[in-house]
Image (spheres, rainbow, N blue to C red):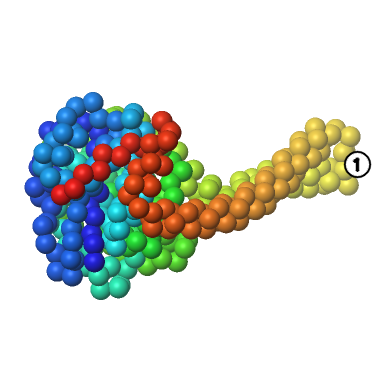
Amino acid sequence: MKLIIQIPCLNEAATLPIALADLPKQIPGVDVIETLIIDDGSRDDTVAVARKLGVTHVVGFRSNQGLARAFMLGIQACLERGADIIVNTDADNQYCGADVALLVAPILEDRADLVIGARPIDQIRHFSMIKKVLQRLGSWVVRRVSNTDVADAPSGFRAMSREVALVLNVFSDYTYTLETIIQAGQKNLRISSVPIRVNGELRPSRLVRSIGSYVRRSVLTMLRIFIVYRALRFFLTVSLLPLFAGLALGARFLVYFAQGGGSGHIQSLILAAVLLLVAFQTVLLAILADLQGVNRRLLEDLQQRERARRAGDSQSQVAARQGRSSERPRDWATSA
């Protein structure tokens, strides 16, 4: 059983040694533990520090691509290197490394496919009240959309089986946390949460540059998730407002028309017709979006097969394929 712990990094030369030192060297039930660093276009000595500290694998992009893409690059790299279980953690040592054993235990015992570390949100002092509220809101949205019972959906401290890693896909460039849970839930994979500990803050969050930016991006991310994965329900719900408003105005016109005063309320009739037309078009949009969802699921199946095929390739084939295009990630693979 091989476990690979992946750590997305962007200019983490100062904090990476602390995060790596906190990781476990042995876990009962795991034969091999390896580490993989995803360099997201760092401009400092992150790669050199990783190599000096004996990181097993280092992969990366030539320029900054964002956390979500770095996460997915790490997943593919772990698959290609034969990982049976993948753990994702942060380079700022936010999560207690010793709790990796708690994350992988449900997978080793075949009780879960994806395990999310649930932070004690209310006890984290450097989280503002607004951030705590948004963390809870994000978890609530994910629970509703994914039909799961995840306690801390925005948590990046998570473990997944190889089977889960093969089916994950992320559309957002901002973060991967919410989307991956929803995908796993919709594919009826077993998702579990375990309480984990957190460490003190070493540096400000890169995702939360300001409260306003965090609120805007979080709301847009949750809205996009709902549209992508619950398109039919979303657009049908949106159609209800113009539908009921149009019916009410139409009924009002009919009442006046029956009383002989319809000629003075033609504007209501026109507005009712416009609203009903908008409602009808929104329903058509809901149907088209639902059909697109079917196509998306078919494409995800094809993508899963391609990932499985690539995961079986030799290291030389992977390196050659990655080096053919400047848009593909660079490979800094090293041996422990």
> Is residue 41 found left or right of 44 in the rendered image?
right
Relative image position of residue 55 (x, y in whole percent): 16, 45
> Is residue 128 found left or right of 247 in the rendered image?
left
| Name of the residue lying farthest toward the front | 316
Examine the image and state in which quarter residue 104 appears. Answer: bottom left
| Name of the residue lying farthest toward the right | 260
Relative image position of residue 176 (x, y in whole percent): 37, 46
Is residue 306 visible in the rendered image? The answer is yes
For label 1, the crowd category at 10 Å Cα-Cα, with few meaning under 14, some 14 to 19 and many 20 or more, is: few
For the point 53% across and 48% down, the residue is 228
Which residue is at the front of the view, 223 or 289? 289
Is residue 66 visible in the rendered image? The answer is no
Q: Amino acid at mark 1?
A: Gly
For the point 41% across and 30% down, the residue is 326
> Is residue 323 found left or right of 131 in the rendered image?
right
| Name of the residue lying farthest toward the top | 43
Relative image position of residue 95 (x, y in whole percent): 17, 49
For the point 30% across and 39% down, the residue is 331
Task: Read off the residue under disc 1.
Answer: 260
